[in-house]
């Protein structure tokens, strides 16, 4: 049986270290990191995410600023809100919750965020820096995956990582992070021929496709480490909704060395990494040394 990778516990440990680092920044530099989150509209899943982000931001001792705008907000008004947060010295990180309503051009507002405050790592300049291997703010979910892999495997050099999914939020940035760790990286996707055979060559297999339980146990190389980024709501036999990942968890547990569960695997890591990015951003903006305990 494989090890179940406990992302929930790992994220709790990270938040604890972040809390200590924040206390140190406040005491030594009078610097209280602040995170602003903008939610446009009333998407219920987004409302839950935004609420959790605010709660955890406050729990680690940072300042939380939440801006909820109506669903029919004009692009110009959102841009004005972003510009105001860019200027606000109490705000070190800005996140615009996605998806945005159709009348707003996503790329335009993301690229309006100050590069230094772009804690999602979605600004084109941060994407470019990540690609070039320069210090940047890296997207949170891929960073969380990488931390779990390093905790499980130590040095990742020479490992063959297969990332299934090529989204801008997960697949592409995670592939770049793994390349930086000297993995051999294959990016697979919906048009990949014989996907099962490609997956079977992976020492590290990452599923980020958004299709419930698509990757089966016999797609996994014995001893591989499996990271499941999927969060899919399915009806169970009893009629209740339950969450499953992109990997057939029971099948994977019979073959892999270690697997992230859904929920409780990658999910909790995302907000922990967002808080870490906010801390990093605040330190960089004030030219303060990054606390060592992180
Ligand atoms: N919606 C779903 N995932 C994300 C994310 O990582 N960042 C933002 N801003 N919105 C999201």
Image: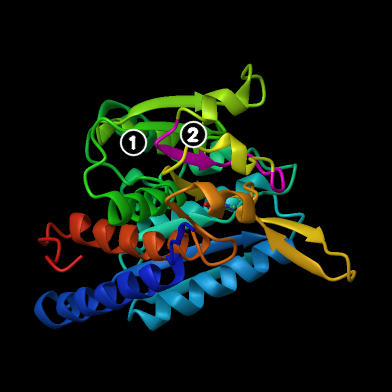
Give the left or right position of residue 161, taking residue 281 as reference. Answer: right
Q: Residue at x 54, y 73 (%)?
A: 52
Residue 15 among those drawn in magenta = no
Q: Residue at x 40, y 66 (%)?
A: 35
Which residue is at the front of the view, 273 or 61?
A: 273
Q: Residues within 10 Å of mark 1 (few under 14, many from 20)?
A: many
Q: Measured from the top left, where is residue 230 in percent x and y?
A: 61, 50
Q: Residues within 10 Å of mark 2 (few under 14, many from 20)?
A: many
Does 103 sit above or below residue 8? above
Q: Which residues are magenta?
A: 202-213
Residue 204 among those drawn in magenta = yes
Cα gap from disc 2 to disc 1, whole angstroms: 10 Å
- Judged from the image, the secondary structure of the residue bearing numbered disc 2 is strand
Instruction: Work out which quarter of the rendered image holds the C terminus and state it.
Output: bottom left
Label 1 sits on residue: 178
Q: Measured from the top left, where is residue 66 in percent x and y?
A: 53, 71
Which residue is at the front of the view, 72 or 145?
A: 145
Discs 2, 1 touching: Cβ within 8 Å:
yes
Give the left or right position of residue 12, taking residue 21 as reference. Answer: right
Residue lying farthest top? 193
Q: Residue at x 25, y 74 (%)?
A: 17
Give the left or right position of residue 216, taking residue 7 as reference. Answer: right
Which residue is at the front of the view, 214 or 35?
A: 214
Lower sequence index among marks 2 and 1: 2
Disc number for residue 30: none
Label 2 sits on residue: 163
- Judged from the image, the secondary structure of the residue bearing numbered disc 1 is helix
Q: Measured from the top left, where is residue 195 in percent x and y?
A: 61, 25
Dominant SS of magenta comes to loop
Q: Is residue 280 something that shows in the picture? A: yes
Does 169 sit above or below residue 276? above
């Amino acid at each position: 049986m494989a090890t179940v990778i406990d992302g929930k516990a790992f994220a709790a440990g990270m938040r604890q270290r972040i809390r200590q680092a924040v206390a140190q920044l406040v005491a030594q530099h009078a610097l209280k990191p602040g995170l602003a989150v903008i939610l446009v509209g009333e998407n219920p899943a987004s409302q839950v995410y935004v609420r959790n982000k605010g709660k955890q931001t406050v729990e680690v001792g940072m300042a939380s600023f939440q801006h909820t705008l109506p669903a029919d907000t004009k692009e110009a008004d959102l841009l004005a809100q972003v510009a105001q947060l860019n200027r606000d010295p109490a705000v070190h990180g800005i996140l615009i919750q996605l998806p945005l309503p159709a009348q707003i051009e996503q790329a335009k507002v993301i690229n309006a965020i100050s590069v230094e405050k772009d804690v999602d790592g979605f600004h084109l300049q941060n994407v470019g820096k990540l690609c070039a291997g320069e210090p940047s703010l890296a997207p949170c979910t891929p960073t969380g995956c990488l931390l779990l892999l390093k905790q499980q495997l130590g040095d990742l050099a020479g490992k063959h990582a297969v990332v299934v999914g090529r989204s801008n939020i997960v697949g592409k940035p995670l592939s770049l992070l793994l390349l930086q760790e000297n993995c051999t990286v294959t990016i697979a996707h919906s048009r990949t021929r014989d996907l099962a055979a490609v997956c079977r060559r992976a020492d590290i297999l990452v599923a980020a496709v958004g299709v419930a339980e698509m990757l089966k146990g016999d797609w996994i190389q014995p001893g591989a480490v499996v990271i499941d980024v999927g969060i899919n709501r399915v009806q169970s036999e009893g009629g209740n909704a339950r969450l499953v990942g992109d990997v057939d968890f029971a099948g994977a547990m019979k073959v892999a060395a270690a697997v992230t569960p859904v929920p409780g695997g990658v999910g909790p890591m995302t907000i922990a990494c967002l808080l870490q990015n906010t801390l990093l951003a605040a330190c960089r903006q004030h030219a303060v040394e990054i606390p060592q305990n992180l």
